[in-house]
């Protein structure tokens, strides 16, 4: 009986998915941008940085850890070992707070951890750069430029004040990095809805809001996925206080496109040069330095729990009766 119910539900779901895909196929783009081909990769040095976090919600606090890793990548393994740094932050977010101080608990916790992760990624990258004789050609961060400059903590409580101070330090450090190396922000997410504002997509003559990935598929329709990038869009940022360019780029033949943000106002030729250097580190399509940094920043849940227990700071979750920690 259950199998019949599941079959019926999945058949219905498939029909709905097909209807959605049919809508996407009917999209027309009014301001269709150029697709600019990339030349051969250019050898370059790159400092990359990424982080991972893990947390557990207990009865009295949300306990979390963030680990950030950064290293120099030149094509020689010795440089990665010699010039790499790690930072780790353990902290708690108390569930006890003054009435009206914070918004929704889950959203607030996620915001704090994300904020701390960005702080550590920038700080550990700065540490690697400062240890080098000369700055790298590229500095690579995982995520959009906006995610590093956005500050959601605007209240007068202690947490918001501390978050703003660390944000100001992060912004100052990023500005310094921008002044000495070409900095590139690479985002894997295609669910953003940015391009529609500039490309004006329509279905049956009516303007629609469409995720970026759907517009990219439309632009690249019938075209082999060779290395190249979308004609850049220039965006001003009130939070950052300066502009940046945004594009989507395919860095290796047959690979997917990634969102690329570059601070300042580089032209097409300079963007081509920067992406050519990035291609040197992206033989499979995604920048290998960022993949390596993500791998080295990971912390397993079991390791996290064991560390908490070793220091006697493990709190009850209330789910022990289910065999969960």
Image (spheres, rainbow, N blue to C red):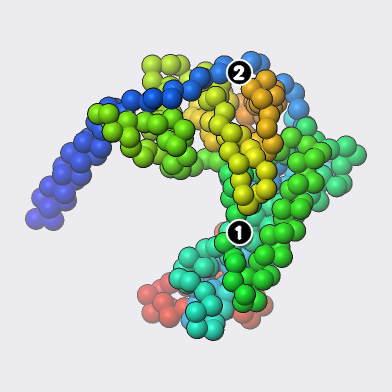
Which disc is residue 163 wearing?
Answer: none
Q: Is residue 60 visible?
A: no
Left or right placement of residue 16 versus residue 256 in this view: left
Which residue is depicted at the point 80% across and 46% down? 176
The correct choice, above or below, for 11 with respect to 155 in the image is above
Name the residue that disc number 2 marks.
Answer: 38
Query: Is 281 or 314 nearer to us in this picture?
Result: 281
Which residue is depicted at the point 81% across and 51% down? 127
Q: Is residue 130 visible?
A: yes
Characterize the local packing of mark 1: few (<14), some (14-19) or many (20 or more) Cα atoms within 10 angstroms.
some
Query: Is 279 or 197 nearer to us in this picture?
Result: 197
SS type, badge 1: loop
Return the disc, 2 or 1, that comes first in the chain's sequence: 2
The reply to whether dot 2 and dot 1 touch (C-beta < 8 Å) is: no
Which residue is depicted at the point 61% across and 46% down? 237
The correct choice, above or below, for 157 with respect to 196 in the image is below
> Where residue 62 appears, x then y in whole percent?
54, 73
Name the residue that disc number 1 marks.
Answer: 151
Task: Give the CA separation, mark 2 to mark 1.
Answer: 35 Å
In front: label 2 or label 1: 1
Image mark count: 2
């Amino acid at each position: 009986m259950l199998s019949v119910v599941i079959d019926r539900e999945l058949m219905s779901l498939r029909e709905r998915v097909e209807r959605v895909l049919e809508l996407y196929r009917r999209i027309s783009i009014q301001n269709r941008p150029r697709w600019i081909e990339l030349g051969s990769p250019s050898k370059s040095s790159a400092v990359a940085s990424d982080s991972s976090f893990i947390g557990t919600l207990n009865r009295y606090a949300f306990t979390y850890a963030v680990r950030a890793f950064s290293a120099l990548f030149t094509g020689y393994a010795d440089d990665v070992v010699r010039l790499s740094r790690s930072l780790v932050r353990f902290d708690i977010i108390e569930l006890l707070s003054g009435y009206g101080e914070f918004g929704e608990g889950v959203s607030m916790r996620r915001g704090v951890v994300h904020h701390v992760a960005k702080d550590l990624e920038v700080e550990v990258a700065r540490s690697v750069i400062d240890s080098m004789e000369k700055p790298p050609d590229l500095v690579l961060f995982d995520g959009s430029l906006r995610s590093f400059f956005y500050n959601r903590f605007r209240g007068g409580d202690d947490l918001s004040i501390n978050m703003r101070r660390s944000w100001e330090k992060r912004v100052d450090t990023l500005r310094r990095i921008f002044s000495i190396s070409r900095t590139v922000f690479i985002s894997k997410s295609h669910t953003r809805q940015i391009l529609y504002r500039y490309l004006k997509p329509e279905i049956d003559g009516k303007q629609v809001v469409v995720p970026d990935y759907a517009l990219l598929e439309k632009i690249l329709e019938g075209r082999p996925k060779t290395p190249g990038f979308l004609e850049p869009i220039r965006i001003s940022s009130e939070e950052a206080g300066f502009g940046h360019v945004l594009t989507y780029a395919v860095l290796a033949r047959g690979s997917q496109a990634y969102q690329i943000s570059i601070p300042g106002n580089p032209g097409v030729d300079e963007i081509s040069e920067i992406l050519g250097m990035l291609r040197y580190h992206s033989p499979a399509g995604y920048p290998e330095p960022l993949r390596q940094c993500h791998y080295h920043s990971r912390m397993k849940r079991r390791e996290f729990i064991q560390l908490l227990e070793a220091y006697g700071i493990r709190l009850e979750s209330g789910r022990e009766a289910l065999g969960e920690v």
